[in-house]
Amino acid sequence: MDELLAVIAELGLELHPDRVRVVASKIEGLGSVEQFALVRPSFGPNADKHLIAKFGRAWQDTGLMTPRDVATALRGASATAIEQERRGSVELTWTGPASGQVPIRHTEQVLMEVINAAQRRLFIVSFVAYQVRSIGGALADAAARGVQIDVLLESSSAHGGKVDHDSAAAMRSAVPSARLFAWSAHDKGAGQYPGVVHAKCAVADGQIAFITSANLTSAAMERNMELGVLVKGGNLPEELHSHLEALIATKVLEPVSSLP
């Protein structure tokens, strides 16, 4: 029984909900598991044939669930998969010494995944950016496929910021079409302790977001201890993307070219 339920859960994840509805309806009309071969074509030509065969064997071996029971279980598995996708998934990322306690992915690998996933819009935020050739190449590729790239960076000291390196100039050189932004001096305040852009994140199409401690530097990608989370699906990526775009619309963030 456990094996059959596990396979049904896997089918719920693998098959489109519309396909599950068709398959469940066909199974529900069977007289017994012995007629399973009659519904195999309803899985469609692109379905995993190994998984379908595994499903048939597990049902045959169990023999305890009626066609109606199996159809109901399939519908439930599909509904659960839809809800899981709606809630999204969160994955830990880490650059630094490994402990062996948790599965982890390196910062650069995850950042590249977000950039490569972008099809329409990409927003990146970092305190500083320089000397990361792979990231620059991925951004250039994204621009070439028509992605709108927005980048928020801390201003250089020459422009009222807190870093000596001109990250905006480096980014413009790597990705000429990117829209570069800085926190407006009017909004972040003046005096001895003005605010700085200390957030680090990347979000693509409002669907996948990477929130990290890492700057866009080779040290952060290769040597430092850096921690982050990759969020796929759910509401958070769209909320983050909308928030950053709203900061542009309200002129909290200003184009670098318009700053003194």
Image (tube, grey):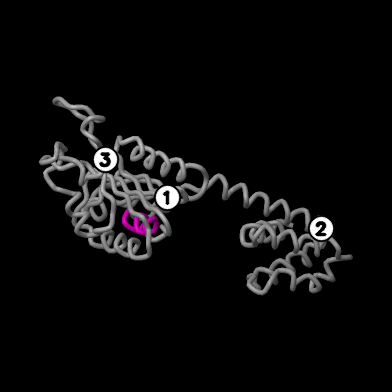
The kind of residue tagged 2 is Met
Q: Secondary structure at mark 3?
A: strand
Which quadrant of the figure has residue 60?
Answer: bottom right
Q: Is residue 219 above or below residue 189?
A: below
The kind of residue tagged 3 is Glu
| Distance from Cα at disc 2 to Cα at disc 3 | 63 Å
Few, some or many residues within 10 Å of mark 2 (<14, 14–19, 20+): some
Residue that carries the numbered disc 2 in the rendered image: 65
The quarter of the image holding the N terminus is bottom right
Q: Is residue 124 magenta?
A: no
Residue 15 location in percent, x, y? 65, 62
| Distance from Cα at disc 3 to Cα at disc 1 | 40 Å
The quarter of the image holding the C terminus is top left
Residue at the location (86% across, 63% down)? 29
Question: Which numbered mark, 2 or 3, is in the foreground of this view?
Answer: 3
Front one among 114 and 226 = 114
Which quadrant of the figure has residue 105?
Answer: bottom left
The kind of residue tagged 1 is Val
Few, some or many residues within 10 Å of mark 3 (<14, 14–19, 20+): some
Front one among 22 and 148 = 148
Q: Which mark is residue 254?
A: 3
Residue that carries the numbered disc 1 in the rendered image: 102
Question: Which numbered mark, 3 or 1, is in the foreground of this view?
Answer: 3
Q: Marks 2 and 1: in contact by CB < 8 Å?
A: no
Residue at the outermost top position: 191
| Distance from Cα at disc 1 to Cα at disc 2 | 37 Å
Q: Is residue 111 magenta?
A: yes
